[in-house]
Amino acid sequence: MTNKHCISTWLRVIGVALALSVSEGPSFAQEHLSLTSAAFASGEKIPAAYTCSGENKSPALKWSGAPSSTQGYAMIVSDPDAPMGTFVHWVIYDIPASLSGLGEGIAKSELVPGVGTQGLNSAGQIGYKGPCPPPGKPHHYHFRLYALNFVMGSKPGLSASELERLIQGHEVASTELVGIFER
């Protein structure tokens, strides 16, 4: 067999393999957790309504692509640009696996029926505390969603660090949406 013939044969084999992988694309696709908001795109400005300059309400969030082993969700919203170190704006967990998002303006109570359990933000309050950076440079707000392989059933009022310890080793996927805000 000549080199030319060997190369031709290998090219045909590679071509068939590529054709099969393209035609069967979805069966080989992996699940990919993604998080979006109708209020702002990742890397874009968070509208004032969701900050201390406005109504200080949580934005509506949607997610998709969770692994089939997901039994619940948790979310931490933080600002690593805060002058005194990372400021946590929201801790919410025990979000049912049946949900694919959170509505706008989640009540600032420990237990939100059908939605989840809320923890303490860095101000020592339950629920969402909108962006409120000091005047100057823009801050980045990380909305981090965790898909978990267990139902937590935890008490209200966990801090972000307590939540992170509890979910360690139970994350089946995670994703984040980053918004920007400055005053």
Image (tube, helix red, strand yellow):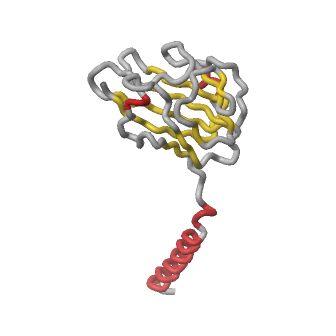
Q: Is residue 44 visible?
A: yes
Task: Please name whichever residue, 109 or 83, is drawn nearer the observer in this view of the structure.
Answer: 109
Q: Position of residue 83 (x, y in %)?
A: 35, 17
Q: Quadrant of residue 97?
A: top right
| Point 49% across, 14% down: residue | 123
Choose top left, top right, bottom left or bottom right for residue 151.
top right
Does 143 appear above or below 83? below
Specify the quadrant that holds the C terminus. top left
**Is 20 rendered above or below residue 120?**
below
142 vs 22, nearest the viewer: 142
Taking the view exactly as shown, the residue that stands out farthest to the left is 136
Above or below: residue 127 compared with residue 148: above
Q: How many marks?
A: 0
User: Whole-percent x and y of residue 27?
Assistant: 63, 63
Q: Looking at the image, which residue is at 49% across and 16% down?
A: 122
- Residue that lies at the very extreme toward the front in this rendered image: 55
Residue 23 image point, x, y percent: 57, 72
Percent from the top left, x then y, of residue 141? Answer: 42, 30
Q: Is residue 5 left or right of residue 180?
A: right
The outermost residue toward the top is: 124
Residue in the picture at 38% in, 22% down:
132
